[in-house]
Image (tube, helix red, strand yellow):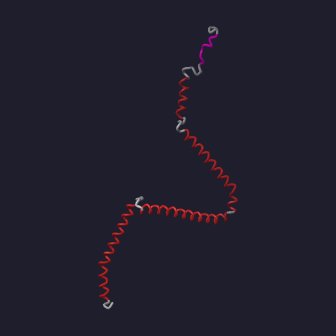
């Protein structure tokens, strides 16, 4: 049978088994694989695509919201400024009260630890400042004691009957 039909034994010159086209075919896939992201880059790529999609959606919705609600915003603008000012003042007051509250609690906790001898952060600087203040006060007291009598005698010289 093979002798009667010689075309069945010949290979196709453009087929994948042809040795002249096999290297070009594998080189093409190697190039594609070299430019494809690695498995470690795939989650980053997907995350970036999702964030880009959400950014575009946010910009689109914001733009359409401004377009549709701009007449309402313009008509009611005289009311928005006083309301905004009141809300800003109330929020600033609330934030400052909360901040001062947290600051006072932290300060009282630090003082409690300091007076109990637990050595909170910065206790050495406080002790140094306390000793410097005490030394300065004692020097001022000694100076006043020394020169206090001098001034008293000067006053008696100026007013002998006093």
Given residues 12 and 29, the one toward you in this image is 29
* Residue found 60% across the figure and 44% down from its top: 50
* Residue found 37% across the figure and 66% down from its top: 130
Q: Looking at the figure, which quarter contains the C terminus? A: bottom left
Q: Looking at the figure, which quarter contains the N terminus? A: top right
Given residues 82 and 128, the one toward you in this image is 128
Q: Relative to 101, say whether 157 is above or below.
A: below
* Residue found 35% across the figure and 66% down from its top: 131
* Residue found 36% across the figure and 64% down from its top: 128
Residue 87 covered by magenta stretch = no
Q: Position of residue 146 (x, y in %)?
A: 29, 78
Q: Relative to 91, say whether 158 is above or below.
A: below
How many numbered badges does the structure rendering display?
A: 0
Given residues 98 and 43, the one toward you in this image is 98
Q: Where is residue 108 in the image (x, y as percent from the top left)?
A: 47, 63
Q: Residue furthest bottom?
A: 161
Q: Position of residue 51 (x, y in %)?
A: 59, 45
User: Magenta region, mostly helix, strand or loop?
Assistant: loop
Looking at the rendering, the stretch of residues picked out in magenta corresponds to 5-12
Q: Position of residue 94 (x, y in %)?
A: 57, 63
Quarter-of-image position of residue 9 = top right
């Amino acid at each position: 049978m093979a002798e009667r039909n010689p075309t069945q034994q010949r290979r196709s010159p453009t087929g994948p088994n042809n040795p002249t086209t096999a290297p070009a075919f594998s080189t093409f896939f190697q190039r594609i694989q070299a430019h494809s992201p690695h498995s470690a880059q795939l989650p980053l790529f997907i995350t970036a695509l999702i964030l880009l999609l959400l950014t575009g959606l946010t910009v689109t919705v914001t733009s359409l919201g401004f377009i549709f609600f701009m007449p309402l915003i313009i008509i009611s603008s005289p009311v928005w400024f006083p309301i905004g000012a009141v809300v800003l003042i109330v929020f600033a007051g609330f934030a400052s009260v909360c901040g001062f509250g947290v600051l006072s609690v932290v300060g009282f906790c630090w003082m409690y630890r300091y007076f109990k001898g637990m050595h909170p952060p910065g206790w050495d600087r406080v002790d140094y400042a306390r000793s410097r203040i005490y030394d300065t006060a004692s020097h001022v007291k000694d100076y006043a004691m020394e020169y206090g009598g001098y001034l008293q005698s000067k006053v008696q010289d100026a007013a002998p009957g006093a």
